[in-house]
Amino acid sequence: MVVSSTSLSETGKSINSCRAGIPVIDLSRPMQKALLIQACREFGFFKVINHGIPTKFIEKLEDEAVRFFNLSQTEKEKAGHPFGYGNKRIGPSGDVGWIEYLLFSTSQQNVSGRCTTYLPGSFKKLVDAYLKEVKMFACDILELMAEGLELESKDALSKMLKNEKNDSFFRINHYPTCPNLLNKAQCGQNMIGFGEHTDPQIISVLRSNNTSGLQISGKDGSWISVPSDSNSFFINVGDTLQVLTNGRFKSVKHRVLADSRDSRLSMIYFAGPPLSEKIAAIGSIMEDGEESLYKEFTWCEYKLSAFKSKLADNRLQMFERITSAASH
């Protein structure tokens, strides 16, 4: 991975040129570090090309997932809970979507639960191979961020993910075609596949097939459609990274819309810190006199809080520091 700094004027020009679209980070080219930092500041989201991850086994994993989702409902539900197969219900707080999914914990003690014992061995091997590659990729991205932020150490962010107790998850989402989508009386203007939300983790690494549907929220609150690209990865800034950077990076709100013609398959790696990790603004990032925007909390505390919330809630709000002057 070849990277180097670039001037702010160069960065601003490059980001400004794609304001109507999505920032693109090309890992085969120099001067990407500053572009990445500005993309995190302005969008909280970017596309990565020339990432070096072979697509062959990714496509095989996708094929295995499609075969699974084509099974009968009875067969799919054998994959079990809390990890494994889910259908329409998103979380415990009543949120629903036009979606079915497979959810895996990536920790060694949980990955071999009821879900993976039901899945074919070939499926499990492909999941393991994919997770190995995508975890290294996520660490590379976090180290690129650390360098761009001029943190004291290159692994200031990635060390949480490299910790064997990291609390990361892998999810394969399937959005079936919605035949009633054109019937506005039944489905409305937009049929929601996965409702608007931010991801609570550090970053999310997304790969999808060639079906559109993903949208991110712009600064003005409008929804920006993300063009499909099965050869690239997309990175979301999560709530945890927003806190660690004291608001410099923005956790992006996003959603997925259903499609009346094509089904969508996406694979997301949620890079989470260890449960006991204390989450607070990194000291070396703070300027003189700068105050922390958030109270310190552990990842476990934040995760439990997020688990109780609705999908669209601002989960960070209850951890914000509010001065008495600001509250009047």
Image (tube, rainbow, N blue to C red):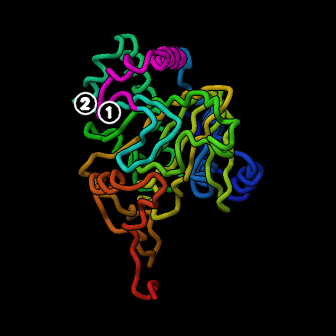
Residue 137: x percent and y percent? 47, 33
Question: Mark 1–mark 2 contact, CB under 8 Å?
Answer: yes
Q: For the point 77% across and 50% down, which residue is it?
A: 17
Res. 23 in view: no
Q: For the point 41% across and 78% down, which residue is it?
A: 322
- Residue that carries the numbered disc 2 in the rendered image: 110
- Image quadrant where one finds the N terminus: top right
The answer to whether residue 72 is magenta is yes
- Residue that carries the numbered disc 1 in the rendered image: 105
Which portion, as a residue range, is magenta? 58-86
Dot 2: what SS?
loop
Residue 86: x percent and y percent? 39, 32
Residue 264: x percent and y percent? 59, 28
Dot 1: what SS?
strand
Q: For the point 54% across and 52% down, which residue is it?
A: 148
Q: How many numbered markers are drawn? A: 2
Along the viewing direction, whichever of 108 and 69 lies nearer the viewer: 69
Residue neighbourhood size for the residue with mark 2, other residues' Cα within 10 Å, grouped as few (<14), some (14–19), many (≥20): few
Q: Which mark is residue 150?
A: none
Give the Cα separation between the discs numbered 1 and 2. 6 Å
Along the viewing direction, whichever of 19 and 219 lies nearer the viewer: 219
**Kind of residue at disc 1:** Ser
Residue 197: x percent and y percent? 50, 51
Res. 308 in view: yes
Look at the magenta stretch and give its main secondary structure: helix
Q: Of the residues under marks 1 and 2, which one precedes in the sequence?
A: 1
Q: Is residue 149 left or right of residue 306?
A: right
Above or below, 134 against 46 in this view is above
**Kind of residue at disc 2:** Asn
Along the viewing direction, whichever of 70 and 114 lies nearer the viewer: 70
